[in-house]
Image: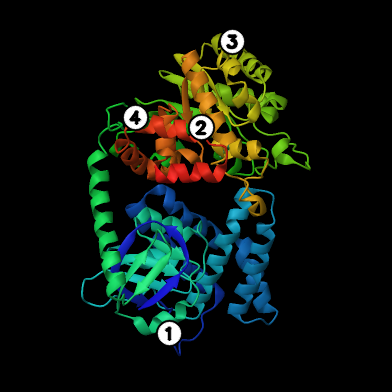
Amino acid sequence: MKILKGIAAAQGLVFGKMIYFEKNFDNGANEIGIDEAAEKALEKVRYLHKKTLDTLGAEKAKIFSAYEMLLSDKMLITPIKTAIENGEDAKSAVESVTKTMSDKLSSSKNEYMRQRAEDIIYIGSLLCDVISGAEDGFDFPDDGEKYIVAAKELTPVDTMMFDKDRIAGFITEKGGATSHVVILAKSLGIPAVVGADGIAEIKEFNGEEAYLDGYGGRLIITPDEGASAEYARKLDDERKFAQELEKIKKNGAQTEDGERISVCVNIGKPSDLKGYEEEKLDGVGLFRSEFLYSSKSVKPSFDEQVKAYREAIEKASPDAVTIRTLDIGGDKRLDYLDMKDEENPFLGNRGIRLCLKNEEIFAEQLKAILVAARGYTAKIMLPMITSISEIKKARAVLDKVKKELDAQDTEYADKILVGIMIETPASAIMADSFAKHSDFFSVGTNDLVQYITASDRGNADVEELYNPYHPAVINMLSNVIKAGERHGIEVSVCGDLASNTEFTKLLLGLGLKKFSVPLPVAGRIKHKISHTDGTSARALAKRVLGAEDENEIKNIILRG
Ligand code: PEP
Ligand code: MG
């Protein structure tokens, strides 16, 4: 038995035969020139673009349209040619130019540009493969079986060149949990483990049977009797679980004792709603509108905004879409907005503060939301609220926008609801007062935990302090839910806590009636809700609220 450990990047558990992927170089082939290589690489990328479009849809295919653009761009090919003219061989010219470009992009303040850094590296590797005549993918053995593919590294090009019907899972040494390969693996529904050291040792196990555990980040090759029994049982549970998920797909979430609970989705762009109509869900609880503003280096036009919001609203219809207004600041910057460098950006000009200081941008967004929601209810959510005056100011801007639309005789939303994110201690503590000025609350636990525990959500050094089991966090959640009940307004949780099945029972026990989670985890949350009894959940909440220490709370929650 051989076990390899890595990072669990795409969930799932599979059993299959091992196969080691290495590029086959066409030995003896004459290296080809850069123009011919770029042309061949472009041909390959166009083919993969079409294949991805047909199998995984437009969103994932964008990875390859970005490559098409880069390969046709003189900014990339010209310096490579110059380096070759100056005496470098083709491969090292490609490597040095792409490395310099990628390093430059990595340090850009613009997120869109930073993301292009990885693309440039992959383009470089594709060009080098073509120059040295590497063969595409490889042929799987002629047995029709599924294989676990092991490799040092898999680029998106490698990943999409495989015949997906023959792949059980991926394990690689390089690559992070958010790399493109992992994104593709997730959309193929295939488990993936990355960052697994010692992958080259696997070569000698080609054809051997193995379990790939995408939950625990493990590969178990030629399992012994004990491991075989354990993993066979887990695999059986996995199959049963998948069957149960399939069964509850078409029904709304309901607790064991029959209480209907809403499960909504969090999206960052309209295409995140792919597959929404196949499942019974209850709308979009959080549309993070930032993507529109940060995916390009210029501000999105009014029409672009209307189009994106309308697309989401129509896709989710008849369920409602809650659009959160621009939440920039903190770790998110926009180059075209005048944003000063701040010593403590998370305590600085963030979310609603920045919007109220840039009223034109804010008003344009509100107008776009209202126009996009014509014929529907507009649900507008304000981020980072700490004071009632911010809600009043935002409502005043909204009134001004409505008047403008009336004056222009432009059709807009039939009904408008204005809610707030509860993600600061100020709003959580004063939830009773804030409820009088809000049509709904949505708790952003990602920020709420950081501000309550005074520990930066992105700082690994204080990871232990950033603790959602902290009694202050749970008491605040309880306070917010109760305030919502008293004032008859809807309360949801849209932060990561809502996606964590460890917390589902507690949240139900605290009285939560609405969860908002990423679409891929919605089924698991519905499943957990359907196996939870209200009375027992309330008893758990009571025990947790009586505890004083985060470790004690964690134990109570884990014991259920
Ligand atoms: C949150 O803070 O929990 C939240 C949902 O918002 P974001 O993660 O976008 O800050
Ligand atoms: Mg937040």
Query: What is the distance, in whole Å, between disc 4 and disc 1 at their CAs?
Result: 65 Å
The quarter of the picture where residue 374 lies is top left
* Residue under numbered circle 2: 545
Query: What is the distance, in whole Å, between disc 2 and disc 1 at their CAs?
Result: 67 Å
Q: Is residue 527 left or right of residue 322?
A: left
Which SS class for mark 4? helix
Upstream in sequence: badge 2 or badge 1: 1
Q: Is residue 463 left or right of residue 37?
A: right
* Residue under numbered circle 1: 26
Which SS class for mark 2? helix
Q: Nearer the viewer, mark 2 or mark 4?
A: 2
Instruction: Give how far across and how far down residue 412 sits, in percent.
Output: 48, 16
Upstream in sequence: badge 3 or badge 1: 1
Upstream in sequence: badge 3 or badge 2: 3
Instruction: Give how far across and how far down residue 129 sits, in percent.
Output: 49, 76
The quarter of the picture where residue 366 lies is top right
**Amino acid type for the residue under numbered disc 2:** Leu
Given contact means CB atoms under 8 Å apart, are the residues at marks 4 and 3 in contact? no
Nearest the eye: 357 or 367: 357
Which SS class for mark 1? loop
Q: Is residue 548 above or below residue 381?
A: below
Q: Nearer the viewer, mark 3 or mark 2?
A: 2
**Amino acid type for the residue under numbered disc 1:** Asp
* Residue under numbered circle 3: 403
Q: Is residue 81 left or right of residue 288?
A: right
Given contact means CB atoms under 8 Å apart, are the residues at marks 2 and 4 in contact? no
**Amino acid type for the residue under numbered disc 3:** Lys
- Residue shown at the point (51%, 17%) measured from the top left: 439
Upstream in sequence: badge 2 or badge 4: 4
Upstream in sequence: badge 4 or badge 3: 3
Q: Is residue 18 left or right of residue 356?
A: left
